[in-house]
Image (cartoon, helix red, strand yellow):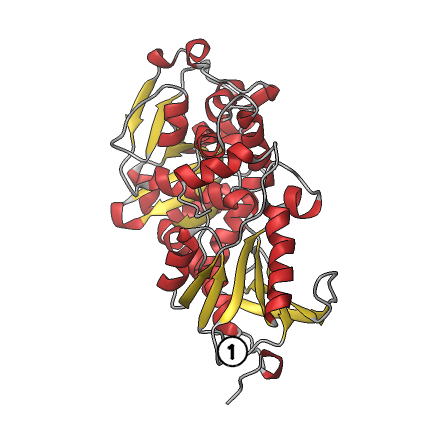
Amino acid sequence: MVNKLSDLEITNSPAGKSSPAQTSVERAIGDLRRGALVILRDAPNQAAAVVQAAEMTTSMGLKMIAQITGSQPTLAITRNRAAAINIFNQSSNVLSISLPQSGGPTFIHRLSDPTFLGDPDNNDSKTLEIDKLTVIPESVGGIAEKAIQLTKYARLLPSTVFSRLPLADINQLSNFKQDNGLLLVETTSIDTFAKTRAQRLVKAISAKVPLVDAKNANLIAFRPVDGGDEHLAITIGNVDISKPVLVRLHSQCLTGDLLGSLRCDCGDQLRGAIRAIEEFGGGVLVYLAQEGRDIGLINKLRAYNIQDLGADTVDANKHIGFEADERIYAPAAEILKQLGIKSVKLLTNNPDKLTQLSNEGVKVIERVAHIFPSNPHNEDYLKTKAIKTGHLF
């Protein structure tokens, strides 16, 4: 039996060949990020729509959507973003706003982006004349909700401009997409994307990288077969997988990890985890590409602008349209499984990590507290995490 991680042969996971469904979502992410249009088809409900990320909307894009579908585009925003601009409807996760004839790109950007033109709206509902807009609750799990999920995967603002296709065009969708040169994505592929992408991680390469606080360290890079974000496993010292392994799940934070930002405690947690694992004698730090609780660097900086106006870290994310935390830990669980690790002692203050990792089949034997002193810049941030997201300090 192999007990030492250093003796373990890490194979290219159960991924196999590329998945057409998975690849279509990856391609759609790239298309949306460069401002292109895509078609979403919700086959069970016989619905389809042409979609563009609201953040990337231009006059030409709006014109193309109208020409392709024969109808005026609609703006879809999340319930959180709607509440931020004083549109309250608790019956739906997503609301669509009918765009007036004068509702061009600037109008759309102001509705979807609280930091548009560097001027966070902060109660901009009066100048937006919210009460004159036609707002429609979208069905839970409907095509508008799937479109917004796709923009989240693209790490763009969670808002889309879309227009539904007539039924006649849906029935001829193969010819339609060929004639218009647009990528077609099935909504079922979006539903399974995050979990499937995690399950299709493969080891790309490993290398010895001595660290300041852990000379005997090895970096193992993992990436999905179909493309997407790369994650790292940093193995430190002697890792005995026959016993519970000391593990830290750390979400990437460029500002804290690399630049030493004082707005968060991420840099302290990263370096502190490496020291703790070294002192323990060995373990693993899984470094996840989940910047800003997985909203991406640009959206995290947008949230910082909102915080500077007085919002806390949770409300800032919601003001932009996201949930307080968008992360899932299926990739971390898959990496640990590929390393042969079945049980862990988890370095964390976040109870959600304990729950998600356990639900993904990795047994959490113990939570190891991971607390560092605050500073004048992150005191309120840490208090908010304790009060609003249940962090255990």
Whether residue 175 is visible to the viewer of this picture, yes or no, is yes
Picture quadrant of residue 33: top right
Give the side of residue 387 with respect to residue 116, left or right: left
Give the side of residue 146 with respect to residue 250, left or right: left
Depth check, front residue: 213 or 337: 213
Image point (59%, 47%), residue name = 266
- Residue type at numbered disc 1: Ile
SS at badge 1: loop
Depth check, front residue: 98 or 81: 81
| Vertical order, 279 against 110 (above or below) | below
| Vertical order, 383 against 30 (above or below) | above
Percent across and percent down for residue 143 are 34, 41
Toward the front, the furthest residue is 373
Image point (37%, 57%), residue name = 355
Percent across and percent down for residue 294 are 51, 46
User: Circle 1 is placed at which residue position?
Assistant: 241
Number of disc labels: 1
| Vertical order, 206 against 67 (above or below) | below
Depth check, front residue: 350 or 89: 350
Depth check, front residue: 158 or 282: 282
Picture quadrant of residue 214: bottom right
Picture quadrant of residue 307: top right
The 10 Å Cα crowd at callout 1, few under 14, some 14 to 19, many 20 or more, is many
Give the side of residue 208 with respect to residue 139, left or right: right
Whether residue 74 is visible to the viewer of this picture, yes or no, is no
Percent across and percent down for residue 315 are 44, 30
Image point (64%, 44%), residue name = 256
Percent across and percent down for residue 48 are 35, 41
